[in-house]
Amino acid sequence: MKNPQVPRVLLVEDDPTSRAFLTAAVEAMPAEVDGADTLAAAMALGNAQDYQLWLFDAHLPDGSGIDLLERLRRLHPATPALAHTATGESEVRNRLIASGFSDVLVKPLPAAAVRCAIRRLLSLPEHDAPASSSTASSQEEAPVWDDDIAARALNGNRVHIATLRGLFTQELPNARRSICAAAQLGNLEALRGELHKLRASCGFVGAARLAQAVQALQAQPDSSVLLQRFDQVALDTAEQIG
C-alpha cells in the first residue's frame, strides 16, 4: 500500500548498480520509488501515475532524459524534475537546465547529496548535511576497493555497500566486454556511453582503481595502451571482491 505521507519518485536509470544506489538513497528520505530502465518503461509509469518528483538519467538506451522530460511534460506540466549524469561538463548541465530540469546531479555523489537536492526541490526539511564526493588522486595508483569512498557515498551503510558491490561485480564482465568490443570496432560513441555508465557505478561502490582506468580511457578513447590497462584492472576488480 502506498503511503500518502511521503513523496513518490519516478527514478529512471539503466545501469543496475546506479539504479540500486539511487533507489536506496531516495527511499531513506523516506520516499517511495518506482524505477525504470528505459524511456519506454518510464513513459508507461509516468503516464499512469502522478509523481511528486522525477529523477531522470540524462542518457538512456532508447533515448535521453531530455526526450523523456519533454514527453511527460505534456501530461504533467508542473512535476519538478532532476537530471543525473556522470558527465560534469558545463555544456551538458546548461543543456539539461535549459530543457526544463531544475538541477543536475553529477554521479557519483553521496546519498546525502541526492536527498538534499530532492528535499530542496520539494521544500522539505533538511535532515542530511550536504556532503561532497571525493575521488582517488590520479597521480597515485588507487586501491582496487576503497571502503572510505563507498562509505561516504552510502552514509557508512555496510550492508548496502556489500549488496551494491555484489551487483557491481556481477554486471562488470558485461560492461568490460561491451567497452572492449566498442573500442576494437572503433565505435567511439558507444565506447563513451559505456564508460560514462561504468564511471558512476565505480564511485558508488568504491571501485577506485577501475574508476581511474575508466577516467583515463575517457580522456583518450583511442589509446590501445589505456584500453589494455582498463581491461586488466576490470579483471582484477572482478576477481578481488571487496
Image (cartoon, rainbow, N blue to C red):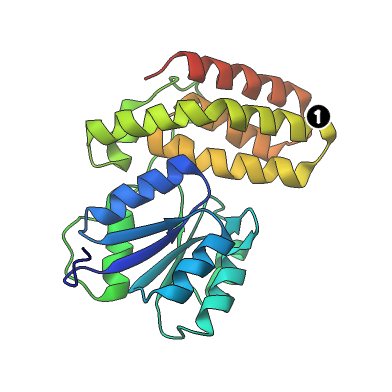
Disc 1 marks a residue whose amino acid type is: Gln
Residue 17, given in percent of the width and then of the height, sits at 44, 40
- Disc 1 is placed on an element classified as helix
Q: Is residue 146 visible?
A: yes
Quadrant in which residue 156 is drawn: top left
Q: Quadrant of the C terminus?
A: top left
- 134 sits to left or right of 154: right
Quadrant in which residue 167 is drawn: top left
- 5 sits to left or right of 120: left
Q: Which residue is mark 1?
A: 184
**Vertically, is 1 above or below 109?**
below
Please give the name of the residue rendered at 53% of the width and 61% of the height, measured from the top-left corner. Answer: 41
Q: Quadrant of the N terminus?
A: bottom left
Please give the name of the residue rendered at 39% of the width and 40% of the height, measured from the top-left corner. Answer: 134
- 228 sits to left or right of 89: right
Please give the name of the residue rendered at 72% of the width and 36% of the height, measured from the top-left corner. Answer: 220
Residue 66, given in percent of the width and then of the height, sits at 59, 69
